[in-house]
Image (spheres, rainbow, N blue to C red):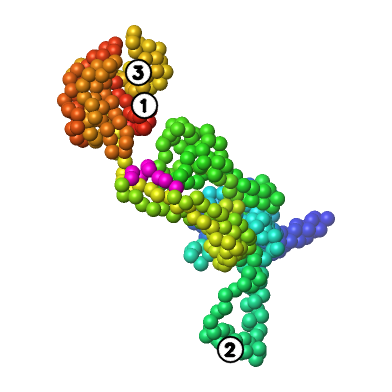
């Protein structure tokens, strides 16, 4: 029995030796086990987003494994996939260690990233028109949007939009190109004809056509309709990656881009314009026109030729410019003819001949921006009967100007109906009164000739001056007169001193302007 036990122990020891030898051999013959140098931490467990993805002996290639794992994840979708990727390591020092194969680590990383997908960004296209932008899901939708903008003016579908690379940009930015269906067809046919004798004959015909004088076209020779079409704004299209909620539906984009909205523009005042006419011409309320322009106080504010006013006009986000060839018949007016008279002032006119409308047939080329007409060129005109022009005689001399006759002073009575300030005073005031101390200098409002200088009933001491434009000015309640009848005076020349003579309630100057012998409100004529 003891012999058997000793034999069993020998066999057990031999078995343990074989096992140890096999273990040591496996370290040398299996690549997943490596003998490592003792230099501190020499083997590392790698965690991605807190998930263990493998063990490595060198950290240098871990980033490359992650890049490859991201590439594999991105390959599972046509869109841009975002995922968290936080790497973490746990190092230790061992003599022998098992490390994982590169492909195993990369595969494990891909799985870990798949569990950490944050969001998927859709490949889309951003369309920029001036300050407006909209995001669409495909180039097909971009083209549909742009085509909808021109179809509004192209009912026969003669033009189509395409996207081309913008050669002036360093980055890949797309812009638009509009093509004529008819022109493209003609180019294709011309290219085919070049290869045949027909093409040679066509070239000869064109050569001789240049030599022969061109005959005047008849109305029936014109091909009326849309002649050119282009966008009035620069369109830029770039590829982008966006979330679902950032992408606009095609129908909504078309509504936003083609719907007319009120936009501010500058209007330059032309001869004959009034504020009410400008408001009516631009289809905006007069009150809104006044509110938009700080320089206009009210509907009576003065405007001059060349002034620039802010107006609003209805325009879509993307404007379309086009030219159309049109035929029409109309009654027309001849341009006014003027005969200059150097003895008259510019505010004097007289009609010598009354006008009469004529009739004509016309073919025109009209340029539009959206629905607004920009210009009109007559291509052919046939007069049925001539218009008779209006002939107007007009003056060329600049009329005199009028200034306030005193410096300072307080307006104490205006022009028009009033309560009599004192016994004997009129209840209808025919001038303007400025209260001022006695002895204030009174000046000629405009150059002219003194018609009267002396005492006048009710006026006290008074001066009358006749002016070159037929008007007369009067200065009353003076304390001293400094001019004589028949004397010529210049604008601003001192003619008297203020006072309190005649029917007066205190020291002041009474001032009148008369046109055709009748008093008018002086404030309307003073500069």
Q: In this figure, which residue is indicated by the disc labeled 3? A: 413
Q: Is residue 106 visible?
A: no
Determine if the magenta segment contains residue 443.
no
Tag 3: Cα neighbours inside 10 Å, few (<14), some, or many (≥20)?
some
Q: Is residue 358 above or below residue 486?
A: below
Residue indicated by mark 2: 204
Looking at the image, which residue sits at the far right? 1
Give the mark nearer the N terminus: 2 vs 3.
2
- Residue 81, numbered label: none
Most prominent secondary structure in the magenta stretch? Answer: strand
Distance between the Cα atoms at labels 2 and 3?
A: 89 Å
Helix, strand or loop under label 1:
strand
User: Residue at 39% across / 53% down in the picture?
Assistant: 339
Q: Does residue 36 appear to the left or right of 298 in the view shown?
A: right
Q: Earlier in the sequence, mark 1 or mark 2?
A: 2
Residue 258, percent across and down? 64, 51
Residue at the image point whose x is 67% and y is 48% from the top: 255
Q: Position of residue 371 (x, y in %)?
A: 60, 52
Q: Which residues are magenta?
A: 344-351
């Amino acid at each position: 029995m003891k012999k058997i036990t000793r034999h069993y122990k020998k066999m057990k020891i031999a078995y343990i030796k074989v096992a140890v030898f096999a273990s040591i051999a496996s370290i040398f013959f299996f690549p997943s086990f490596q003998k490592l140098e003792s230099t501190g931490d020499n083997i590392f467990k790698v965690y991605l987003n807190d998930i263990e993805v493998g063990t490595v002996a060198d950290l240098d290639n871990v980033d490359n494994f992650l890049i490859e794992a991201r590439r594999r994840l991105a390959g599972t979708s046509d869109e841009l996939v975002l995922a968290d990727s936080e790497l973490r390591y746990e190092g230790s020092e061992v003599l022998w260690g098992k490390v994982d194969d590169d492909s195993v680590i990369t595969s494990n990383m891909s799985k870990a990233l798949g569990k950490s997908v944050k969001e998927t960004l859709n490949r889309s296209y951003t369309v920029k028109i001036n300050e407006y932008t909209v995001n669409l899901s495909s180039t097909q939708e971009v083209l549909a949007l742009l085509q909808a903008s021109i179809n509004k003016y192209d009912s026969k579908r003669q033009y189509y939009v395409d996207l081309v690379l913008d050669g002036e940009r360093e980055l890949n930015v797309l812009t638009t190109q509009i093509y004529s269906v008819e022109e493209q067809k003609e180019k294709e046919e011309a290219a085919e004809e070049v290869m045949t004798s027909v093409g040679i004959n066509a070239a000869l015909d064109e050569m001789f056509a240049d030599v022969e004088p061109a005959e005047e076209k008849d109305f029936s020779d014109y091909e009326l309709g849309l002649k050119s079409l282009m966008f009035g704004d620069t369109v830029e299209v770039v590829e982008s990656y966006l979330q679902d909620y950032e992408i606009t539906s095609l129908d909504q984009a078309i509504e936003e881009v083609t719907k007319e909205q009120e936009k501010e523009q500058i209007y330059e005042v032309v001869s004959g314009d009034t504020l009410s006419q400008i408001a009516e011409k631009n289809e905006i309320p007069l009150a809104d026109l006044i509110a938009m322009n700080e320089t206009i106080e009210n509907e009576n504010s003065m405007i001059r030729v060349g002034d620039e006013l802010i107006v609003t006009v209805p325009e879509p986000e993307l404007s379309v410019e086009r030219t159309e060839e049109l035929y029409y018949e109309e009654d027309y007016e001849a341009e006014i003819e003027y005969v200059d008279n150097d003895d008259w002032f510019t505010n004097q006119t007289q009609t010598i001949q009354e006008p009469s409308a004529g009739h004509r047939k016309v073919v025109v080329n009209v340029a539009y921006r959206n629905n607004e007409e920009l210009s009109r060129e007559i291509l052919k005109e046939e007069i049925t009967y001539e218009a008779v022009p209006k002939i107007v005689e007009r003056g060329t001399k600049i009329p005199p100007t009028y200034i306030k006759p005193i410096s300072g002073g307080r307006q104490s009575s205006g022009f028009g109906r009033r309560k009599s300030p004192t016994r004997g005073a009129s209840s209808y005031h025919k001038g303007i009164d400025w209260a001022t101390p006695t002895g204030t200098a009174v000046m000629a409002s405009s150059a002219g000739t003194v018609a009267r200088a002396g005492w006048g009933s009710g006026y006290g001491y008074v001066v009358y001056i006749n002016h070159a434009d037929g008007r007369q000015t009067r200065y009353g309640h003076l304390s001293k007169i400094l001019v004589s009848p028949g004397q010529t005076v210049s604008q601003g020349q001192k003619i008297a001193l203020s006072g309190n003579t005649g029917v007066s309630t205190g020291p002041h100057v009474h001032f009148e302007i008369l046109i055709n012998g009748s008093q008018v409100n002086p404030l309307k004529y003073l500069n």
